[in-house]
Image (cartoon, rainbow, N blue to C red):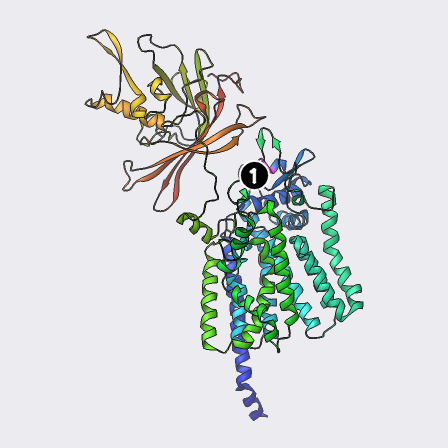
Amino acid sequence: MTDHSANSASDPVTEARAVRRFAMLLIVVVASAMSFTQIVQSTPLQSANDRSRWETVWSLVERGTFQIDEIDAVPGWGTIDKVRHEGDFYSSKPPLQSTLVAGVYWCVKRLTGWNLTENTVEVSRLVLLIVNWLPQVLSLIVIAMLVERYARRDFGKLFVLVVASWATLLGPFTSSLNNHSPAAICVVLALYPLLRVITDGEHRNRFFALVGFFAAATFTFELPAALLVVVFGAMLFKVDRKRTLTVFVPAALIPIVAFVALNCVVTGSLSPFYSSYGSDKYVYEHAGIPSYWSHPQGLDRNLDSPLMYFVHCTIGHHGLLSLTPVWLLTLVGWLGWRRWPECRQRTMLIVGAGLTAVVLGFYLTRTQNYNYGGNSIALRWMLWLAPLWLLAMIPVFDAWGSRRGFQILSSCLLAASVVSASLPGSNPWQSTWLLSAMERWGWLEYSESPPPFEFGHPLWSWFPKLGDPAIEGRVFVRFAGTGANLLGTVENPFSDNRFIGEFSLTVETDKRTDPKLPNIQAVTFRWNHLDHIRSAFDSAPKVGVTIDNSLFNVGRKSSEFLRLVSFNPDTKASEALSFRELSDAGGDTRERLLAAQRLVTGLPQSVEYKPGHIRYLKTPLRSEKAFRCQRAAAQVLFQPQHFDHPLRYRCDLWLCNEIPFGVAQIEITITDPPTGQMLTFQRLTAVEASPFPSLNSSKPH
């Protein structure tokens, strides 16, 4: 008895199995821990895609409706993935997933007292751990069981599990509320029981039920996966008709009926909203703002030909093989399916290759949607097929896995894929690294060049016009802002830290001019702390600058259009002196002009503003209809006092010809370049102006 026990303990096969299983357990644990860390460190509401789902989740729990109008208007929550249906906004995503997640959020809210708007970070991370992370851990365990059961070589078993853990582009999606990672998990949970039936001959009811339920669940996340339900059902029907009809079909109907029923409730039809792409549900104008899909940007512009689209989907900037070269081993498995006589999953090789070809072909035919899945790190609508691609690697390793050359080659492919999958970090909603590289190298360009300024001249100040030519007499615009007033530089005496918190800035001019200086126009700037705006207005900090409008209106530099008006006792007349004429002046005179220059440019150094794209902005000036604006921006590196290195000063503008002085909103940002830390962010929004009635008539102008 003792000898037998000793022999069993020293059996090489048993020892190898124990070591292999420990290694597989370690892979699953480490991958799960890394995914957990990724979620708890991720930024919530990462993109319009996941915000669209989160908006439905919030609306269902907080308002009991699928309409997202209220939450979509909250800053930071807005999404372009929405439709206009019967006078309200809805998410364009199928409602079933959001409804299930809403149930999880309801439980989290009841247990913790947190809500999505006040505790966005905590709630979103906790929900993602439940709906993304736990299922992912389960799927890795099932993949480990699958390769342990159906792969013959240790190297192949460990390799496939490592690919599933770190080398697919599904990983970054775990930290976002999306449909792709749940769909891939459902394929795993359907594939394993399917193999137990068709390969091992275990005709158990639970296997038929699991295949039916999870194959149909895959369809609810990815509509092309309807073919998966049909194919898996046909495979089971071939081996056991009775159980297919009595177990598989009823189990599959559960998610399908729920999916269709919810679509009918929300959309009024069997189809989800995104099947109506291009209709008036997507292309509309609301409150003066056209939908994003009226004039899409970037990849959504649909610029590529079918041939070029196919190239980029396979070996280009969104290529399945270029971004994840380990799938070349899958391609070998498919092409050599006749060479694997000992493979027990040869049928699944044909199924995987066929489904991949059909799904890719389906999206290639949708020429109006040639956007590679939008701004994301992968050809994301193909990722749910990844479990079938993993399965196709097994016979390749069974045949060649003991060859040292093959091990080295496959390891190189694996390493490249792991690096590619790790580059995005925890944000899947960004350009692929290959697309970014191609754009940086100048090989291609999907973004649209911004139009030139509508006022027709270069811009060297944060306001493109002096008052408003259509208004006689005094012209003004008042901005409301928060934070320290940093319109100029921290060294500007008119932007000290006396106004921390809410404040206002009023810019005004008067059409009355000195007849001897007809081109000179005075502009006055007033600051007020809003708590004291009524009583302290007249004593508020105030500064005036004088501008040669003949030079300003043709886009000359601030050093050219700024003037200093003084009285010449010799000629007994007023003179408007320029920077050039005061080049030798010192002391207060020179500093006054430099301070005026910093004030009108919005930056510590004069720099030209660059035009941006057309955007739409709602302000208190006209809350019922947005203003059509053009973005503009300028930035400089400047080293203020008490700093040992330069800071980056940036000023972003929302320009609008309908408003006096031509600007609806100003955003000032100061960042520390070495760390990327934002030191100051300030937004000033127009709230009152000459042509517009005051929101509160008791407030002085």
Q: Which residue is mark 1?
A: 78
Is residue 385 positioned above or below 374 on the image?
below
Magenta stretch holds residue 295: no
73 magenta-colored: yes
In the rendered image, the vertical position of residue 334 relative to residue 603, given as above or below: below
Q: Main secondary structure of the magenta part?
A: loop
Q: Position of residue 494 (x, y in %)?
A: 34, 25
So how many labels did they put on this image?
Answer: 1
**Which span of residues is magenta-colored?**
71-78
Q: Residue at x 52, y 18 (%)?
A: 692
Q: Nearer the viewer, residue 516 or 545?
A: 516
Judge whether 629 appears above or below 573 on screen: below
**Residue 415 in sight:** yes
SS under mark 1: loop
In the rendered structure, the answer to whether residue 300 lies left or right of residue 513 reads: right
What amino acid type should be assigned to the residue bearing mark 1? Gly
Q: Position of residue 76 (x, y in %)?
A: 53, 39
| x and y percentages locating residue 403 in the rendered image | 48, 78
Q: Nearer the viewer, residue 33 or 181?
A: 181
Quadrant housing residue 189: bottom right
Location of residue 451 with respect to 330 vertically, above or below: above
Give the side of residue 583 with respect to residue 539, left or right.
left
Residue 548 shows up from this direction: no
